[in-house]
């Protein structure tokens, strides 16, 4: 009888402790307000970025604790140009899912835009309607229309959209940060910096995306070896600092990256230039990243479960435990099975999945399986 009573008391005590722990965790979660700022500096070559970084000419970018190599995803013949790589950056999907391979909408299965509901902005808004989501782009075409926003007529000033495609506010055609290339000036004012600073309201929770077109445009006009190209990257660093300083009291997660590199096959082009960079203040676990990993990292930080997303997210969080293939914040038998299913595949093959390539070496092999097994049973808090 005493044993039965003791067992009942132990069970009740255990249930009470678990309930208390759950309530404490819930209170902590509700008290934590998380915000994100994502910057895209269009067309930054890794070699030039490293040159400026090593010379101390990117003072803001030198402040985040993590600066790593970023590589475009070339799977399914996606070209290293603005539309397909931003589609991957903003969705966590490769071209086989986005249906966007090139800048030319007539050659894309999905035309100009991401399929509805696929973008990180739509999904964050669906998960947390209280989060203010705002963004701006200097490219009405290839970025604005890729997200579903119609470009303004040629020569017309910017257009502000409200409550569309996951954004509370989105500004199309902020133009540039600087007054060159001259052929892009026309009669309208370059207001990229001014517009983005205005949008960056320090009222958490928020999720902001700011796209700066200057490096890409100056690279096409002057070449990636030019002073103008370097000035454009410095200008991006400068405005990024101003925006982040304005938001500093909210302690947002900051991710700064680019859609592609520059300088290949010619100094004026980038159709064969996958190498760029990623900088962040998040505690990332990897030394290399791909465009497809940006969105899963944001979901991970915001604690948005992705296991139920359809189609399944193709990238992996840079914060996750190595081996957490399905992004459910632990490493279990499902992750091991997923890796084994595509075992032996290499970059460029249809069956290759970058989230299963844990060490990012372009092939899914025994090292990936072993790494996942080493972390088997681990969970993210």
Image: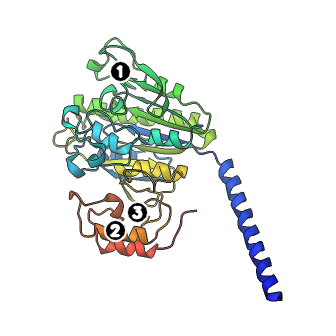
- Give the labeled residue for mark 1: 179
Q: Which residue is at 48% across, 24% downward?
A: 195
Q: Earlier in the sequence, mark 1 or mark 2?
A: 1
Instruction: Indicate the position of residue 93 as horizontal and vertical percent values.
Output: 34, 48
Q: Secondary structure at mark 3?
A: loop
Position of the N terminus by quadrant: bottom right
Are the two marked residues, 2 and 3, in contact with CB atoms closer than 8 angstroms?
yes
Q: Viewer-proximal residue, 117 or 180?
A: 117
Q: Is residue 144 left or right of residue 25?
A: left
- Give the labeled residue for mark 3: 325
Instruction: Indicate the position of residue 29 as horizontal and vertical percent values.
Output: 65, 52
Instruction: Check the image and report above or below for 194 versus 95.
Output: above
Q: Which residue is at 29% across, 33% downward?
A: 216
- Give the labeled residue for mark 2: 339
Mark in the foreground, 1 or 2: 2
Q: Secondary structure at mark 1?
A: loop
Instruction: Indicate the position of residue 2 as horizontal and vertical percent values.
Output: 83, 88
Q: What's the CA distance linking mark 1 and mark 3? A: 45 Å
Q: Earlier in the sequence, mark 2 or mark 3?
A: 3
């Amino acid at each position: 009888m005493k044993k039965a009573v003791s067992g009942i008391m132990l069970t009740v005590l255990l249930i009470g402790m678990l309930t208390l722990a759950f309530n404490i965790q819930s209170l902590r979660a509700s008290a934590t307000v998380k915000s994100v700022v994502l910057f895209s500096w269009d067309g930054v070559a890794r070699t030039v970025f490293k040159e400026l970084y090593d010379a101390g000419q990117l003072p803001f970018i030198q402040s985040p604790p993590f600066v790593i190599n970023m590589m475009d995803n070339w799977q399914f013949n996606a070209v290293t140009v603005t539309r397909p790589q931003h589609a991957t950056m903003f969705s966590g999907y490769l071209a086989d899912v986005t249906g966007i391979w090139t800048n030319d909408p007539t050659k894309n299965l999905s035309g100009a835009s991401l399929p509805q509901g696929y973008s990180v902005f739509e999904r964050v808004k669906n998960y947390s309607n209280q989060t203010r989501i705002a963004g701006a782009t200097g490219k009405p075409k290839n970025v604005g229309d890729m997200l579903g926003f119609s470009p303004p007529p040629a020569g017309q000033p910017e257009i502000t959209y409200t409550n569309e495609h996951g954004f509370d506010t989105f500004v199309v055609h902020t133009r540039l940060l600087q007054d060159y290339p001259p052929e892009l000036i026309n009669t309208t004012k370059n207001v990229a910096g001014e517009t983005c600073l205005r949008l960056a309201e320090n009222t958490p929770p928020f999720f902001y995306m700011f796209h700066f077109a200057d490096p890409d445009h100056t690279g096409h006009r002057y070449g990636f070896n030019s002073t103008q190209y370097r000035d454009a990257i410095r200008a991006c660093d400068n405005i990024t600092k101003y925006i982040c300083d304005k938001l500093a009291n909210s302690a947002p997660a900051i991710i700064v990256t680019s859609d592609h590199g520059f300088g290949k096959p010619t100094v004026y082009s980038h159709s064969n230039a996958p190498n760029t960079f990623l900088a962040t203040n998040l505690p990332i676990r990897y030394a290399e990243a791909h465009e497809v990993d940006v969105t899963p990292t944001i979901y991970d930080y915001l604690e948005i479960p992705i296991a139920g997303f359809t189609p399944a997210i193709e990238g992996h969080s840079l914060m996750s435990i190595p081996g957490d293939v399905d992004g459910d914040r632990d490493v279990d038998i499902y992750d091991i099975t997923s890796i084994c299913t595509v075992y032996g595949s290499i970059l460029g093959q249809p069956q290759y999945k970058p989230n299963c390539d844990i060490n990012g070496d372009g092939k899914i092999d025994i090292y990936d399986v072993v790494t996942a097994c080493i972390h088997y049973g681990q969970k993210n808090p």
